[in-house]
Image (cartoon, rainbow, N blue to C red):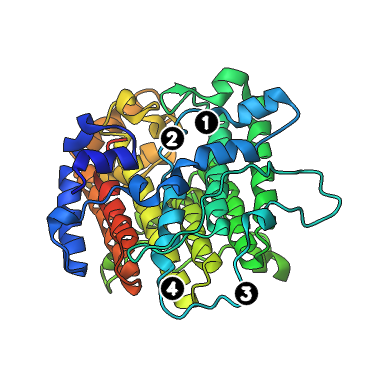
Amino acid sequence: MASIATFLTGFTGIGASKATAWDTALSRAHSVVAGSSAVSPASSVINPSELLGSDLALLTSNIRRLLGSDHPVLKSIASYYFMGSGGKHIRPMLVLLVAKASSIAPTPRRTSPPLSIERINEPISSNSEVLFALAVNAPPLSASKQGGEILPTQRRLAEITEMIHTASLLHDDVIDMSLVRRKMPSVNAEYGNKMAILAGDFLLARASIALARLRNVEVVELLSTVISNLVEGEFMQLRNSANKKGTPEPKTEAQESLETRLPDSLAPLSRQAPNMREFTDEITNQRFEYYLTKTYMKTASLIANSCKAAAVLGGCNELVADALYRYGRALGLAFQVVDDMLDFTVTAEEMGKPVNADLKLGLATAPVLYAAEQFPELDVIIERNFKQDGDATTALQLIHASNGIERTRSLAAAFCEEAVEALSILPESDAKKVLIQLTEAVVTRKN
């Protein structure tokens, strides 16, 4: 049986000293998994790094090969966050787990053989001068009765997903003027803003080349939408108010066709029952919907669309692909909601970056919005973006005096329940169990 510490090491690399923080999450994961399959709780803790093996272990080194450049400084900066372990790798881990879990799903739609690693390294255009190292490590295909195979295109998708995510970190840290990332100086702190922005652009460019070489138009559209959403979400954060929309300009048919299609509400279905709005005040509801939309754009879109893209590359039918999109969207929203909660509940050392940063940036996240319903005096502070002396201190006091943090945790749990429900379409497998366990880990993570 894999121990809790082993599961932790596979998920975050933080070791046994942090294991107690996850006990609650894993105990609930046991009950969820036990309810969906005939396994005992004791056997349901699975080490994701052992399950994925070299598919995950080779991720960072493969990305470094994809970022080869004749300019040593550019190569060094672009690879800055891919040195050593390179972070938690949550997003590529999800892509690989979805690939394994969906490979044994029913009614595939694949009409042609999957591409080989040699094929996805080949340029499409004869004029393309960007050549990826052919020495990119590619573990052989292997299928097990409890997992299924991971295709070369899906491995490459995992690498692309992490490249896009890292590019967004480079740009975010410049915009937010953040000097610390992953308990080390951020790229902009180490090399300056101009270099950080150019390195982020380079990562996106190399990710786009790799994406095109997957030779799947639907997957190209899904991941291109992610990049568009990242920029839209950043603009929403800079504007930072549902009440500052102004009078919209008329849109052309072409512009409307490119807009992101969002559901009427991104709130969990459990919060959308008739006559059960999240807040009693209409303005607060508008703020909350704005917050969730921004959160989808900046965080959940990448997870949702990369999960769907993994299913598409694996030849899954539309029902399975859409279910995995819903899983990724719900998990991504939960992940960011918890991140916003941790901004008020953990230390900078635990978080690996500055805390209370959102208030300093003038951002009202879920804990603040919930607290404002209990303490209406927060409304004025929110509208002026916490800019007056003492605003941040007052907001902190009111947040901790309210039930905002607990309601935020409850919101994240509701999203995770939706994520688990979306997985019901998949057959039982070890990969599916880990996907469920990750929803539980998200709710109680400490960094």
Instruction: Give the residue at mark 4.
Output: 320
Q: Amino acid at mark 4?
A: Val
CA distance separating discs 2 and 3: 35 Å
The secondary structure type at the circle numbered 4 is helix
Q: CA distance from mark 4 to mark 3?
A: 19 Å
Q: Nearer the viewer, mark 2 or mark 3?
A: 3
Q: Disc 3 to disc 1, how far (Cα)? A: 36 Å
Above or below for 75 versus 383 = above
Label whose residue precedes the other's in the sequence (2 or 3): 2
- Crowding near the residue tagged with mark 3, few <14, some 14–19, many ≥20 C-alpha atoms within 10 Å: few
Q: Secondary structure under badge 3?
A: loop
Q: Quadrant of the C terminus?
A: top left
Asked if the residue at tag 1 contacts the one at tag 2, i.e. Cβ–Cβ closer than 8 Å, the answer is yes
Q: Which mark is residue 87?
A: 2
Between circles 3 and 1, the one closer to the viewer is: 3
Label 1 or label 4, whichever comes before in sequence order: 1
Q: Is residue 293 visible?
A: no
Residue in the picture at 14% in, 57% down: 41
Q: Amino acid at mark 2?
A: Gly
Dot 4 or dot 3, earlier in sequence = 3
Which residue ends up furthest to the bottom in the rendered image? 107
SS at circle 1: helix
x and y percentages locating residue 122 in the rendered image: 73, 53
* Separation of marks 2 and 4 at Cα, in angstroms: 29 Å
Q: Which numbered disc, 2 or 4, marks the residue that appears first in the sequence?
A: 2
Of the pair 333 and 267, the residue shown nearer to us: 333
- Between 141 and 359, the residue placed more toward the observer is 141
Q: State the residue position of label 3.
A: 112
Compute the Cα span from label 2 to label 1: 8 Å
Residue 337 image offset from top left, x and y in percent: 34, 47
Most distant residue in the top direction:
190
Which residue is under mark 1?
A: 81
